[in-house]
Image: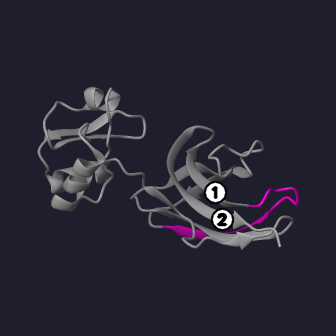
Amino acid sequence: MTRQSYQAAQYWAQTYHLTHPVLHDPPPSTYYWMYSHGYIPQNTLTDRNFVVIYDAIGYYQTAIINAIEAHLSDISVVLPDETPIVVPGGGLEFDVTLKNWGTQAHTFHAWLDGIFPDHTPVPMNPLMGPVVVTLQPGQEITRTVTLHVPGAAPPGDNYRLKVSVGQWPDDIHNCDLMRFDIFAP
């Protein structure tokens, strides 16, 4: 995190071959003062609840990776990378893959939310679910999902679908996003 400039953040990313986000926090630098100690580079990582899980002066890639891996969810969610184009009143079909990377069975909720191009949630979320899923260690499942795009949906780019796993409605352990565009013929 840097208060100096976006260019300084980019320099660090290139110099240290960083593969995680670098934040430019211009004055009044709220997050810099909350999580940094004024040393550069200062590495502070938080979990999804903003609890500090790693805090060190200097760049220690192995330690950072270990801290991240220790706090990853055993359950992964994977949606397609492509950006489908659909028409109002049409259908959207895609695969959702869930995998348990852990050594014990996990039972959790899975649900699908829609997000408008302006980043606001679709009012009738969740669009699907929540459903209770149990995965055994190493088990992977893939399901094909088909959604109907309302005929009144306004054309636009950058609609999103978000599949979340955890404890519905707000304890998300992992999620993935898929972008799609609506095109009016």
Does residue 123 sit above or below 184 in this rendering? above
Residue 61 picture location, percent across and down: 17, 55
Disc number at residue 160?
1
**What is the quadrant of the C terminus in the image?**
bottom right
Quick one: 127 or 3, which is closer to the camera? 3
Residue at image x 58%, y 73%?
Answer: 82
- Mark 2 or mark 1, which has the lower sequence index? 1
Give left or right: position of 124 versus 134.
right
Disc number at residue 180?
2
Q: Is residue 91 shown in magenta?
A: no
Which region shows up in magenta? 139-155
Residue at image x 15%, y 40%?
Answer: 56
Residue at image x 20%, y 53%?
Answer: 12
Disc number at residue 111?
none
Give left or right: position of 19 versus 144.
left
Residue 182 picture location, percent across and down: 74, 65
Residue 129 picture location, percent across and down: 71, 51
State the CA–CA distance, disc 2 to disc 1: 6 Å
Amino acid type assigned to the residue bearing label 2 in the image? Phe
Quick one: 103 or 118, which is closer to the camera? 118
Residue 150 picture location, percent across and down: 85, 58
Kind of element beneath mark 2: strand
Q: Can residue 16 be seen in the rendering of this structure?
A: no
Give left or right: position of 29 versus 155.
left
Packing grade of label 1 (10 A; few <14, some 14-19, many >=20) is: many
Kind of element beneath mark 1: strand
Q: Is residue 140 shown in magenta?
A: yes
**What is the quadrant of the N terminus in the image?**
top left
Quick one: 137 or 184, which is closer to the camera? 184
Amino acid type assigned to the residue bearing label 1 in the image? Arg
Residue at image x 28%, y 39%?
Answer: 53
